[in-house]
Image: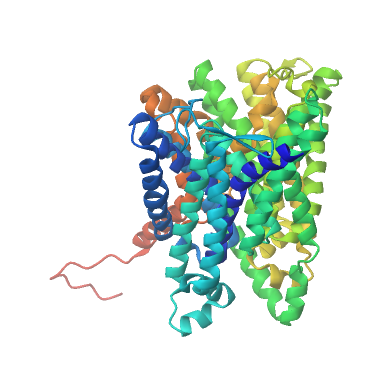
Amino acid sequence: MSAYIISGLVLGSIYAIAATGLVLTYKSSRVFNFGHGAIAFLIARMYYQFAQVWHWNSWLSAILTIFVFAPAFGVFLWGFLFRHLTNSSQIVRLVATIGLFVAIPAIAELIFGYDPTLNTLGLAGANPPVYHVFGVTLNLDQVFVLGFAGVVALALGAMMRFTTFGLLIRAVVDSPTVSRLVGTDPQRVSMGAWALGATLAGLAGVLLTPLVTLDVDSFNVLLVASFAAVVLARMENLPLAFVGGLVVGVIQQIVTKFVPADSVALKGIVPSMPFILLVIFLFFWGSARETVGSRAAAMGVNPDAEKEDITTTTVRRQRSFLRSLTPIAVWGVILAVAVPLYMNSFWLGLFSEGLATATIFLSFTVISGQAGVISLGQSALAGVGAIAVGQFATAFGWPMLPSVILAGGCAAVLGVLVAVISVRLGDLYVALTTLGMGLLLENMVYTIGRFDNFSIGVSVTPPKLGPIDFSGKNTFYFLLLGVFCVLALVVWNLKRSSTGLELAAMRSDPVRATTLGIRPWRLKIFAFGLAAFIAGVGGCMLAMYQFRALPENFATTIGLVWFAVVATLGLRSIAAALVAGLTFAVFPQIISDHLSQTFQTLPTALFGLGAIAVARHPDGVVAMHVQQYKWVKRKLSGLRHRAPSVPDGVTEAPAA
């Protein structure tokens, strides 16, 4: 047992260091940084460049990257982004940090190149000495992990208890207003916290380098596991976050003792333990959180005084926005129908992929755009739809149309289940729960042999409806276009319905909406179910395009890139979902055709930077251009109706 505990402490030390950095930045700015693992990857990639590519001394490389560049990068992020998010909504904050999650690794590969080497060295060098502790073999890199974890624990404890900076952080968290009155600048304190948080992320990244491959997915999955410790600490308690990280690592390793080494279940259960604990902690702490309705009642808001303000404003804004999108939608349909006439089979295939992806993206329009909830598990729900249609249509031999509907229903049931668990916890906890759900499915369901089928998936072919065979490129394209239009019409009608107005009111002001008799948790559960159904159907369409339901095509990290693309173009717009799907499919191919291999991660970097830009333009690029179009239209209309000027020296004739 001691071997499992000590190896768990090594892994848990990484979790603990990462978790304390997350809690520290959240305490000072109320921004949960989903890009924490991306920062760790960037620092680790710099360390590798210095130490193994340029052959600098390993300790000098570590000092420069961890204690010089990392805090400077944290200050840069604070000045460029996070200090502007203080008064932003929770959804804008989350979108911006997810943009970091997507953009930073892609930018790192643009700068340093892609080098997924398996021989990454730690601080101990190429042949680290080996030690025996309580009968357990540890190399020097693992000893360094334990040692640095102890130093971080002692240093942070002393800083928070005995230093002025620690006192200022506690003061800013407790009462920012009072802190300003006594002369404390909360912004400077937040800047210092972000510098320290980035330093801890860099330390975790460098210590993690010899334990895993230098791959962004490995880094992100391992550091996302530290979210369980953050939730255990309720985002606030630094000591509890540190201890929670150690506990998560130890439990994860102890599980390996009780699961047979040759068991198929071991492959999924062990890496899934942090996410299982994440869901357990979320459920445990959620029972103690107060609902929006109780806060509204405590505020004593008068329902009658607010009803007309919310509903009238919401109706006016939605109708105005829909009128603005009407010409765009008409031209979009005309162009979409004309695509097969002017595209060869290769580009028609890419546009078909874009339509299938755009169908999945419509789920973001419902859950995030209309309900105002961040769901990071839509790719997993799309994967459920793809897996289910593969089983229903191929394994069971059912007709394709009922199989697609049933597959969407399976995704909807899972979406409702996740919503029931998470919607009462708050927007941040919903994002964490859906992220954990996606990673659990990825580790425990996607790896099942019946679904994975030796990494080739299950065959899925386009359907035949009567005399029409949709396996042809043109017919399949129109099938995808028809499915997208039908679901887009459902989403459009939802916006115009009373339920859509209630969703808009809830998104604008949950407290005042509750006083009108609107029950936000019921609306969110409904939105989750509908969005999950749409994602499941979109997953079926994407599986048909790929001719197989392959679970790895619906990884959670891919879903985060999807979310960044939709957020860039507009979460509330159906047209934006269509443009986002086509952009995601076509833009990388354009880059591949015209730029060298060095720039292949440029689309991902731009998608991530676009999501970061949501902090300045929350409605996205499409809505921004619609507003510009309306402004130009008003200007031109004003010029047409302006009275003609009379030239100098000409006297107007008197009226008859």
Q: Is residue 57 left or right of residue 518?
A: left
Residue nearer the viewer, 399 or 585: 585
Q: Position of residue 425 (x, y in %)?
A: 74, 60
Above or below residue 562? Residue 21 is below
Residue nearer the viewer, 436 or 144: 144
Q: Position of residue 109 (x, y in %)?
A: 42, 34
**For the point 80% across and 48% down, which residue is it?**
416
In this view, the residue farthest toward the bottom is 181
Residue nearer the viewer, 17 or 576: 17
Q: Is residue 570 left or right of residue 56?
A: right
Residue 381 visible in this rendered orientation of the protein:
no
Rendered image quadrant of residue 642: bottom left
Q: Position of residue 603 (x, y in %)?
A: 45, 35
Colour style of the rendered protein structure: rainbow
Residue 515 visible in this rendered orientation of the protein:
yes
Total marks shown come to: 0
Above or below residue 248? Residue 646 is below
Residue nearer the viewer, 386 or 49: 49
In this view, the residue farthest toward the left is 649
> Where, quadrant-wise, is the N terminus in this rendering?
top right
Q: Position of residue 268 (x, y in %)?
A: 75, 32
**For the point 54% across and 55% down, which residue is it?**
152
